[in-house]
Image (tube, rainbow, N blue to C red):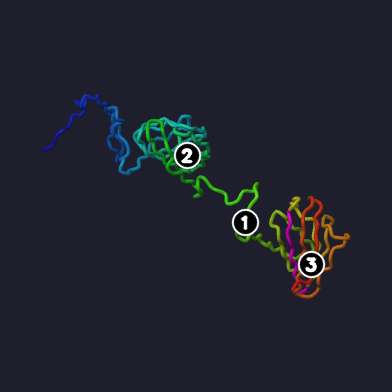
Amino acid sequence: MASTLAVDKIKTLSGVAIGWPAADGALNQVLGTDGAGQLSFRADAAGEVSKGSDIASADPLVITTGANYFICTGTTGFNDMTVAANRHFYLEFSGILTMTHNAGVLDLPSAAPIATVAGDVGEFYSTAANVVTCVNYTRVTGKAVVETPSASLDTVQDWTKGQSGQVTALTSATGITINLADSNNFSVTLDHNATFANPTNAVAGQSGSIFITQGSTGGTAAWAGNWDWAAATAPTLTATAAAVDRIDYVVRTASSIHAVGTLNLS
């Protein structure tokens, strides 16, 4: 037997005045209360995700009811939110802004600020009105929101395992220019009478080695003026095919590179 429930006739429930939503909700939404008698349609707490209207970034950021997934637009940073208690919701950011940790108000992972980029998604829960914890944050890059560096560049390091620097191959030619920004160590199989030009991107303190192997036709090496040798004399490379010589260098200044040759290594 068909029947109609006229809910507009219900004004109170156990003495509490009930406020009904003005219109129907979206598909799969349920009717919920804010704990003070005001009913509204919202996503199913059992796990249904419902997208709401975009939220313009502001401080505080106002989280609306009736949905639990929002796109946060704009670039205004914030450190607190206006939101009802016991809300579980998601924010997808469409641009760059900074969320700042605010202990007990907006708690972020590791108490560190988060600089958002387009596509990042944060998961939040409000334990009380306007008291929010970021329980998860997923970067669009897949990287961790707080990355712990394995080494710090400005402190003394105690390496407990072997470290290595790559050996970058150079191409044999009559003129060879080493870009010291590419590596510390280099190698070349020499098939030309080559002049090693002044390196580019020489920075004081950099050091490394150049491994020179004689190719099938072999070659000699001359060195431009920024290469400084003991007694101002560059070594003569070993001429034997497949012989290996090593040039070790230390950059004293951008225009002075101290070098020494170790020849005919087996």
Q: Residue at x 48, y 42 (%)?
A: 109
Residue 209, horizontal then vertical, whole percent? 74, 62
Give the residue furthest to the right.
231
> Mark 1 — residue?
159
> Mark 3 — residue?
262
Q: Earlier in the sequence, mark 3 or mark 2?
A: 2
Residue type, label 1: Trp
> Mark 2 — residue?
108
Residue 253, horizontal then vertical, whole percent? 79, 50
Residue 234, horizontal then vertical, whole percent? 85, 63
**72 over 202 or under it: above or below:** above
Secondary structure of the residue carrying tag 1 is loop
Secondary structure of the residue carrying tag 3 is strand
Disc 2 packing (10 Å; few <14; some 14–19; many ≥20): many
Magenta stretch, main secondary structure class = strand
Q: Quadrant of residue 223?
A: bottom right
Q: Which residues are magenta?
A: 206-217
Residue 22 visible in this rendered orientation of the protein: no
Q: Quadrant of residue 199?
A: bottom right
If the image is split into quadrants, where does the C terminus sit? bottom right
